[in-house]
Amino acid sequence: MKRLLSLFLFSLIFMGCKNDNSLVFEPSNFGNEPCANCASVSISIPKAIGNKKLDETINTALREEIIFILKYDDAVNASSIDMAIKSFQNEFAKLKEKFPEESTQWEASINGEVTFENERMLTIRLDYYLFTGGAHGYGSIRFLNFDKAKATELNNEELFKDILDFEGYAEAKFREQEGISSTASINSTGFMFEEDMFYLPENMGFTNEGLQLFYEQYEVASYADGPIILTFPFEEIQKFLTLQTF
């Protein structure tokens, strides 16, 4: 009897470990102290601190996305966030040396937060702002979506059973939100969709309110219009989604 009980308890522990998709995060900060003659960089992101493959996947995706945002010179081979920061600062220093009277202070700010998590999915949103001279800086976001069970980052197509099916639904909601008739051109009110055809944005991810589609400035509208955001409640779109969200 004791042997059977021990085997049963061992099986429960094994199954619990095998299916343990729990995550623990700690703040991770990068950057430099403000100074008059250097580029200012401030980064604050969540870091997964376990030893599972999922933790490695999350941290790698965050690192690569931040390097992509910061790397000003494509010829520079930055393999870490610190190297990307150094590259950003070096480019400002070169500009400052070449045009000491004309160069303005460069700035980069990146903040990350978990916006959605359940047993199967995780979404992290990166909000960032860059200023490298000119009339104004540039701010945007990046969503990173993960399948916790498979320990993989999801691309947009993997979020849906049929992305074209969802695209048709999203277009109807977009037209409703923006006051565009179902029979009118999608660009009839001033939008700038290429070839006058609706398409989904590159940035989409989950929040506690549902799935958010984020069209960046210039993606389908002018800078003055700002970003275009649509949010779909989970109960309305679960039929389109690959993974259960509630």
Image (tube, rainbow, N blue to C red):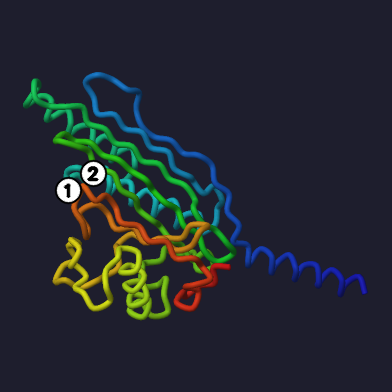
Nearer the observer, 149 or 223? 223
- Residue 31 in view (yes/no): yes
Amino acid type, label 1: Asp
Q: Residue furthest right?
A: 1
- Specify the quadrant that holds the C terminus: bottom right
Left or right placement of residue 48 versus residue 77 in this view: right
**Identity of the residue drawn at 26% across and 49% down:** 226
| Residue 65 percent location from the top left of the image | 33, 51
| Pointer 1 with pointer 2, Cβ within 8 A | yes
**Identity of the residue drawn at 9% across and 25% down:** 102
Tell me, for residue 74, which label it has, or none.
1
Q: Label 2, on which residue?
A: 71
Left or right placement of residue 17 versus residue 79 in this view: right
Q: Quadrant of residue 190?
A: bottom left
Residue 246 higher or lower than 166, as above or below: above
Secondary element at tag 1: loop
Amino acid type, label 2: Lys
| Residue 111 percent location from the top left of the image | 40, 41
